[in-house]
Image: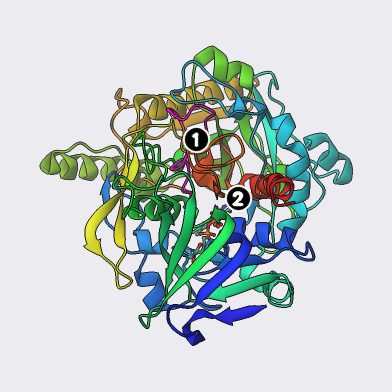
Amino acid sequence: MHIDARNLDTDSLIEGDICIIGAGAAGITLALEWIGASRRVILLEAGGFDPDAQMQELYHGASLDRPYYPLQSVALHYFGGTTGHWAGFCSPFDPIDFETRDWVHGSGWPFTRQHLDPFYARAQSVLELGPYDYDPASYELRDPDFKRLAVDESVFYPKMWQFSAPTRMGTTYRDPIVNARDVHLYTYAKVVEMVPNAAATAVEHLRARTLDGKEHRVRARHYVLACGGIHSPRLLLASNSRTPRGLGNDRDLVGRYFMEHFEILGGQVAFATAHPFKMYAYPGRGSKGARAEMALTAELQRKHRILNGTVSFQAGALTGQEQSRFASFSGDAAANVKQQEALAARGAARGAAGAPPPNTTYRLFTRQEQEPNPSSRVVLNSEKDAMGMPRADLHWRFTGLDKRSIRVFYELLGQEFGRAGLGRVQMMEWLTDGSDDTWPNHLSGGWHNMGTTRMHQDAAQGVVDADCKVHGLANLFVAGASVYPTGGAANPTLTLVALALRLSDHLRAAVR
Ligand SMILES: Cc1cc2nc3c(=O)[nH]c(=O)nc-3n(C[C@H](O)[C@H](O)[C@H](O)COP(=O)(O)OP(=O)(O)OC[C@H]3O[C@@H](n4cnc5c(N)ncnc54)[C@H](O)[C@@H]3O)c2cc1C
């Protein structure tokens, strides 16, 4: 059932058993689970069915510290959420991602990868992927052209990925949601505050507003916050009329530990001979295929005390422009200009010396987790948006382990490719400057916003518990990558869909 909240009389009361705030990957996954469950499920979406510039403007915020994408372009503010933009790259997190690693601050999930496996298997079909099979041997059996690189697999192994079409949740699941009798979707219903009871032990009601100035009240037995990694903490922090620090924020943890994936060129490899490479090649958008990335084993991560990461291969050598663009820079602008000129000249000289033969040289593209860091965070700005909500600003900050891990990965890759006689690896300048604090001027992430309402059984160390319930609040849950204690090497959506399914099962027991 669909209701446009702009057509309701102002001050309407909306009531249900479960209220899901946000209809993106997490919120829609949850709502689908409740179709036919004979419970009244309220799904509140701030936007409409189509992109809307006025709504998108509400996501505007400042990006401070490390350069990041403009915040209004990082997530989408309409039905289907950011799956309107996502690329569909999917792979489960590795077992080591769930472990407590004494060299990674804040690491350790309250459960194992094995516990999540059945939910991953269900998540595959939500994202219209193939069977839950990420064993490279299965793919080699199916396709004789899938040939793995002959490296020592106790060092590097082929980590498989599957590619969603990509599923646009707002298109694929619009009809099932709108036609469901027990799911009540309200579009243009932006929640601007979650109001707790007087003791601040549970959410009492929500205030939802429309752009034309109407305000409605929403009451449910259970609430699930599913607004994404920047706007879920924003709403918790902005819910401060009765709790000045915001909801669930007694320990000042909401918004902290913002994590991304570093997705960045780190070097190139010149192979001694051509390789078919089909196994490592991106099959192309819409193909629903699979590919491998080169991943460092858990044993080697432990030995070198580094973070989890992979590299993928992009055909062709680094251009001089890329070399200079990704060189590392200091705070001294004049020195940077000089350095940039010198690097561009060196890159051009390399190009003039003759590029290696085609199909043997590949650029190396890093994908790596970021160490949880409390000073990397989403905060409220004093400026308010058109709905009267404080805007969210981002401080994206790193640790020395982040860069050291990328560098050590490339060193090991170079050693292993050399030992196996496969070829030679060259690192980019920014990785070899001897500093763990300098980063390229054109850093990039994967548009993955994680960690800002982190999960931990101890309320002193996490915003939500192992059931994704906000500590100290009896009826408020969070769905989405904001609950990740660590971000793994893989993209986040498959895991957050798996967690939404897990949360749905948990709520089913609670709402009996
Ligand atoms: C360019 C791009 C490429 C990407 N590629 C990949 C990829 O290849 N693989 C991958 O795994 N991930 C990828 N991602 C990330 C992926 O899109 C997100 O992980 C996923 O969409 C997050 O789901 P979510 O439900 O938590 O948040 P969202 O999808 O952002 O949904 C949040 C929903 O909440 C609504 N909302 C927000 N605030 C309120 C409020 N106050 N009241 C009511 N509703 C509200 C929003 O309008 C939105 O509909 C990509 C992202 C981008 C931008």
For the point 57% across and 46% down, the residue is: 492
Q: Tell me: is circle 2 under 8 Å from ligand 1.
A: yes
Is disc 1 placed on a helix, strand or loop? Answer: strand
In magenta segment, residue 453: yes
Which residue has dot 1 on it?
369
Q: Is residue 30 visible?
A: yes
What type is the residue that disc 2 sits on?
Thr
Q: Residue at x 23, y 44 (%)?
A: 340
Q: Nearer the viewer, residue 173 or 435?
A: 173
Q: Main secondary structure of the magenta part?
A: loop
Q: Which mark is residue 83?
A: none
View extreme (right): residue: 141
**Frontmost residue, 241 versus 75:** 241
The residue to which callout 2 is attached is 493
Spot the residue most to the top: 303
Mark before the other along the chain sequence, 2 or 1: 1
Q: Which residues are magenta?
A: 446-461
Most foreground residue, 350 or 236: 236
Residue shown at 37% from the left, 30% from the top: 431
Q: Quadrant of residue 29?
A: bottom right
